[in-house]
Amino acid sequence: MKQKNLFWIILICVIVMLITCLYQIHEAEYALVTQFGRPIIKKLTFDPGLHYKLPWPFQVVQRFDKRIQIYQTPLIEYLTGDKKNIVLQAFVCWKIVDPLEFFRAIRSIDSATQKLDDIICSSIGASLGDYKMSNLVSTNAEEITVSKMEEIICTRATNKIKQSYGISIVKIGISRIALPEDNAKSVYRRMIAERSSIANEYRALGKEEADKIKSQADREKSDLLAEAYKQAQIIKGEGEAESARIYASAYEEAPEFFKLLRILEAYKKILDSKTTLVLSSDSELLHYLNGKELK
Amino acid sequence: MTKQEKVSIIAILINLFLTVNKFILASYTNSIALLAEAYHSFADILSSFLVFAALVRDRRTNSSLESGSERQKSGTQNSKSRIFTPGGWENKVALSIGVFLFIVAIGIIGKVRATITPNILHPLTAAIFIGFMALCSYILYRFELQVGTSTKSPALTADAHHAKTDMLASIFIICVFIAEKYGIRIDRPAGLLIGIYILINAGYVLTQGIRAYISAKKGKIYTGGMVYEEVIINYLSHVFHGVNEILWKYLWNLCGSKNTLNVFKQNVVKGIPRILIILIILIYLSSGFFILRSGEHAIVERFGEPMQMDDPLTAGLHYHYPWPIERVKKLNVDNIRRLSIGYIPKYAGDLILWTNAHYVQEFPILTGENSFLDIAMHIHYRIKNLYQFLYTSTDPDKILEQFGYLILTRDFGSGITFSILTDSRDDLEELMKRSLQDLMNTHQLGIEIIEIAFRDIHPPTDVASSFEDVVSAQEDYETFIEEAHGYKKDLIPRARGSSFRNIKVAESYTALLVEQSKGQAESFSMIHKAFAETKEISRYRMILESLEESLSGITKYVLLPQKKGASTDMYFYLESEGWKEQNQPEPSSSFPTTSSPKDMSTIRSEEDMLDIIEQMQKLREKE
């Protein structure tokens, strides 16, 4: 009975050990077999599928992700070639290419990102010295050389990590370009000034246009009135001429009588109530006053 | 301490453990049924305790009587009734348990009736825990039953049945929880059921206690009937037994077995482990079936190696070798995913104005003119190639997001602020979509960009008001011009009217003048005609009439005829009163005197005369 139990226990142990001999490698990972912590170069496998090794605890599998990893640097202030402060944020896509080297030098993704962060930030700082602000941000599209700069940063960083890290950089990209707080504030002020000058221009243009229209209207009004005045005068003149002609044609028939009538008429008008008349007693009117005969 | 007592102590401890666990689980899952069950278990502890007390008392009374096998019999016979020994503390405890259970039952029924009950949380996990507890109860039941029958202690046997009901209740609650998992909400009815059960329990304990008390008062020894739970269990097992037999017979007939029913039964029971093993293997094998819904693609990995690379499995029923040989990775490929870039959204449905901060955080983007714009961009995308999507990068969404920022920074870095805001939006969207797709392709991320949409682009909120001011300035521009047009429209018709009036006035004047002159000419002719007939007389009359008319009512001075060599003197009548008063009063009005306002009585020249006339006129005006 006891022997039977022992047999079963041994059998289970053997099965468990046999199971630990087999290991799967996923499509997205590398596997490295270590024997008592020492990597076995022969057992470095890249092919996915089922593989075998010595059972635990003799050999252990280390797995590394084969896929592209992404890391985002924090926002860091740099100085451009033309002495302008600029805040950049970059990201880096990288992957493990040499699992053996990676295992020796870095071991974990976290420490890899830390080391990458150092390298990338220094590469950006070094590369940025060769570029002006207008190479990053400009209305002239030809002047911008961000893509080229990214490539240069990439090669610079690649050169640094090439041999000793076991990783390769797939892509470095600048994800954000910003300005330091104080500079940003002055940019805001400039933007406000720009806008208000444009607004003022619109208002002034409006006033100009309005004045033009109003003065044109005034001009048209005076033209109209002048024309009307002219016509009125002509009409009046014609009327007066007509009436003069009528009078003349009537008076021409009896000029003597007209003169008489007109003088008498004139007297009436001239000698109004305010007139003070001084008469000579010799006058014909007062002829009888002197006791003379009426002529 | 006897074996029975030890068992009953173990029972108390196990019940205590179960009760505490049930209370904790009930508060975690919000289940009423479980809470009721916890109270039920609590009552069980007390009854276990009473059983223990009864056993202890039995032993003491029996040890004072006799020994041997008789002891067991008489002791056990009394043990049940002794629980309800009148006046004893057990009776009082039993009565108080009854009251307590009664209150609890009422409380649970009240809870069931409450309108709002929270959903049950983690039903499956709880079900597994309760399953473990049911197992504990079952073990306890078997243990107590075994000890109870071997020592022939009905108290223990009764307690075993208690444990059995506990187990049944636990299984019942497991059913409730599993039903809950599948959306069938029977927690409340189950709670009600257990509540009613506790109520009956309480009623039974109370009536038993009261009856025992009354009979004790009358001096009788009360021997209770069956424990109420035994009644239910007996009934249930009876029913179960009947159903069981019927089923066996049916199965026997179905198989047409030549053996007798009992042999058949034995054969079947022997075969059960084999059937179970086959079942387990079948279940294991069938775990490889998987269904892909429309739009879902899947890749099967055999020992980590993908079996399909460029043609993943599409919708339908598929099979893979069960774990650990093969595994499936499936994703919905047709589903359009959405990614926000440039901001961290606050919540949907917010009013988006330039001047209010409408997101948790916005990242200003620097444009070509060195000014900032806040941009909210959305990328719509879907998986084009599942293999690439799964195996080229650890986090395709994060990479896409970063590439989105890259494109945004680069393309806006060469843009002109105002044109980005207005006319070149569509072009930018198209351009960015293309360049982002290029990046996706070069890095083989297996992502297809469907659309890039700017949800809103606006200047930073600090300066937005000045941007809006430009728009209102544009409005002002229009306003000024419209006002001027209004002025013009008012002015010109008025001018036209007034010039028309002027012309008409001139015309009417002319007409009047002409007609007037015509009339006068006519009248002249007529008068002349009359005049010509009596020329001299008429002439004289007319002169005189006109003189009369014109000279009457005016001041007149008459000059005497001038003598040669003498100075010109003037004589006149002083008509005016004021004149008289001002000068010395003259005796005669008709008497010709020389007068002088300034000590001049005689007018020597025409100038003097004019002076006087002037003065007199002034005087008259004063009057």
Image (cartoon, rainbow, N blue to C red):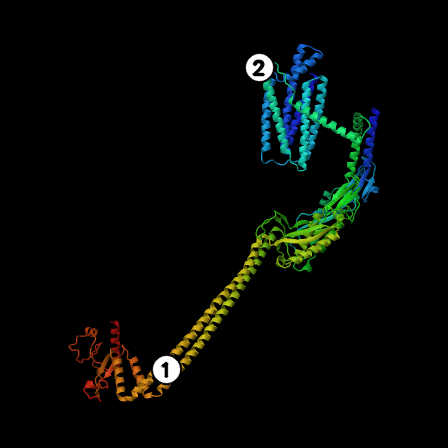
* Residue at the spot of label 2: B217
When asked about the image quadrant of residue B576, the answer is bottom left
* Residue at the spot of label 1: B518
Disc 1 crowd rating (10 Å Cα; few below 14, some 14-19, many 20+) is some
Decide: is B124 above or below B307.
above
Which residue is pictured at 40% across the width and 80% down the height?
A239
Decide: is B292 above or below B267.
below
Drawn side of residue B603 relative to residue B395, left or right? left
Which residue is pictured at 38% across the width and 82% down the height?
A243
Confirm or deny contact between disc 2 and disc 1 (CB under 8 A).
Answer: no
Q: What is the x, y in percent for residue A257?
A: 31, 87
Decide: is B398 above or below A9.
below
CA–CA distance between discs 2 and 1? 156 Å
Disc sitting over residue B413 in the figure: none
Quarter placement of the N terminus of chain B = top right
**Residue B31 can be seen, yes or no:** no
Depth check, mark 2 against mark 1: the one in front is 2
